């Protein structure tokens, strides 16, 4: 599961990516600096794994991770190939969620590809290009299904009607993710198209230092513009995040954050938000060798969670022993949790909960 950072050229995408990841993307004050997508594996900040380290005292800890992709800037006309648009749109298609960076600050020293700062306009440009690309996909599908429907195929006729309505929806300037009250039967047809504008989105307002806490007029305009969308807005000062990233010493980093009135780096909040946006959650395995956080989709069954560790665990799944995170912290050891009768035994159809500490028994 990975999220792609998108936006117009020169809005801070690559700088943000550098703050999030150990991989260093090139960043510069000119458009189209990024051409090939950069991919970084980012640790998910989670205080629980640190507390488990104190309780278990393992040899090492391994946090959960999420993939972030830095995708080159899109421009108006990208859906028709402008600015290598087809390549960039293909890169977005391969991601599971979109992080849309919007420039929400004034600075005459940093050029804007359209000559002025207007994040609502910028958002509209990107939205339109994604919708136009989706429209192209839907129209091709309609032509294919139409030929089958002419033979009297009832299933094809039903699909054709759904596709025609979807085409009208996109032509009206709407993103597929905002479709309300879509029936399960319809969603099967829509989901199979893997449309770009159907992907969940987080709008990241890149502000200056003075606006990082209270925002500014640009941020307010974006919040108003997305009221009808199924999307969140996160305010982040990418320039400050780059400064924070320069501190290797955690104490110095925390002092810097306090000086500017922040409790934590905005990038940490962003990563957790991305994790949620991708509909992911964490379970733990805990032993003296290591405490590890594992990433699974929300609603994942115990047998599937076992398969995340190793395919043999899923094939030969017998049962799972489950400890709630709060119980382990409360009692202070796995032995005391067991003595208190707080270890549960669950079968393969148990829905793993966020924070569960799992021990799988299997036989192959």
Image: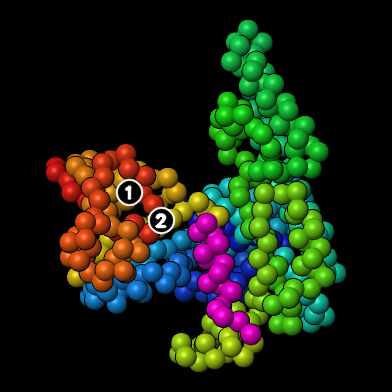
User: Horizontally, is 265 left or right of 123 in the view?
Assistant: left
When asked about the image quadrant of residue 71, the answer is bottom right
Image x and y of residue 220, in percent: 79, 65
Q: Residue at x 62, y 29 (%)?
A: 183
Q: Which residue is mark 1?
A: 305
User: Horizontally, is 323 left or right of 143 in the view?
Assistant: left
Query: Is 164 or 208 nearer to us in this picture?
Result: 208
Q: Which span of residues is magenta-colored?
A: 261-276
Image x and y of residue 236, in percent: 65, 72
When asked about the image quadrant of residue 154, the answer is top right
Cα–Cα span, label 2 and label 1: 12 Å
Would you place residue 140 above or below residue 219 in this image? above
Local crowd at mark 2 within 10 Å, few (<14), some, or many (≥20)?
Answer: some
Q: Residue at x 72, y 62 (%)?
A: 8
Query: Is 333 or 354 nearer to us in this picture?
Result: 333
Q: Earlier in the sequence, mark 2 or mark 1?
A: 1
**Is residue 242 something one can see in this rendering?**
no
Q: Which residue is mark 2?
A: 354
Label placed on residue 111: none
Would you place residue 222 above or below residue 91 in this image? below
Q: Residue at x 76, y 60 (%)?
A: 223
Quarter of the figure that contains the C terminus: top left
Is residue 39 a member of the stretch shown in magenta? no
Image x and y of residue 149, in percent: 64, 13
């Amino acid at each position: 599961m990975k999220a792609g950072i998108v936006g117009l050229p020169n809005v801070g995408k690559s700088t943000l990516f550098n703050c999030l990841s150990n991989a260093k993307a090139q960043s510069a004050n000119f458009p189209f600096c990024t051409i090939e997508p950069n991919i970084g594996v980012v640790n998910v900040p989670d205080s629980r794994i640190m507390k488990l380290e104190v309780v278990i005292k393992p040899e090492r800890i391994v946090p959960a991770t999420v993939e972030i992709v830095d995708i080159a800037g899109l421009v108006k006309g990208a859906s028709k190939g402008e600015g290598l648009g087809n390549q960039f749109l293909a890169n977005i298609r391969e991601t599971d969620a979109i992080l849309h960076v919007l420039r929400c600050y004034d600075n005459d020293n940093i050029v804007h590809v359209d000559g002025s700062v207007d994040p609502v306009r910028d958002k509209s440009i990107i939205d339109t290009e994604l919708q136009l690309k989706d429209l192209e996909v839907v129209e091709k599908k309609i032509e294919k299904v139409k030929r089958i429907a002419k033979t009297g195929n009832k299933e094809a006729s039903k699909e054709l009607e759904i596709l025609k309505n979807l085409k009208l929806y996109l032509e009206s300037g709407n993103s597929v993710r905002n479709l309300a009250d879509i029936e399960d039967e319809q969603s099967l047809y829509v989901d199979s198209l893997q449309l770009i504008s159907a992907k969940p989105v987080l709008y990241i307002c890149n502000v200056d230092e003075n606006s990082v806490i209270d925002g500014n007029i640009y941020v307010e305009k974006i919040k108003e513009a997305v009221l009808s969308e199924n999307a969140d807005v996160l305010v982040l000062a990418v320039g400050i995040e780059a400064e924070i990233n320069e501190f290797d010493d955690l104490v110095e980093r925390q002092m810097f954050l306090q000086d500017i009135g922040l409790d934590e780096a905005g990038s940490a909040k962003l990563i957790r938000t991305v994790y949620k946006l991708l509909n992911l959650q964490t379970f733990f395995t805990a032993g003296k060798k290591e405490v590890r956080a594992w990433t699974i989709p929300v609603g994942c069954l115990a047998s599937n969670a076992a398969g995340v560790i190793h395919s043999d665990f899923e094939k030969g799944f017998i049962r799972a022993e489950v400890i709630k995170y709060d119980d382990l912290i409360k009692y202070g050891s796995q032995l005391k949790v067991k003595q208190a009768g707080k270890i549960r035994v669950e079968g393969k159809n148990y829905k793993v909960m966020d924070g569960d500490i799992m021990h799988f028994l299997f036989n192959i």
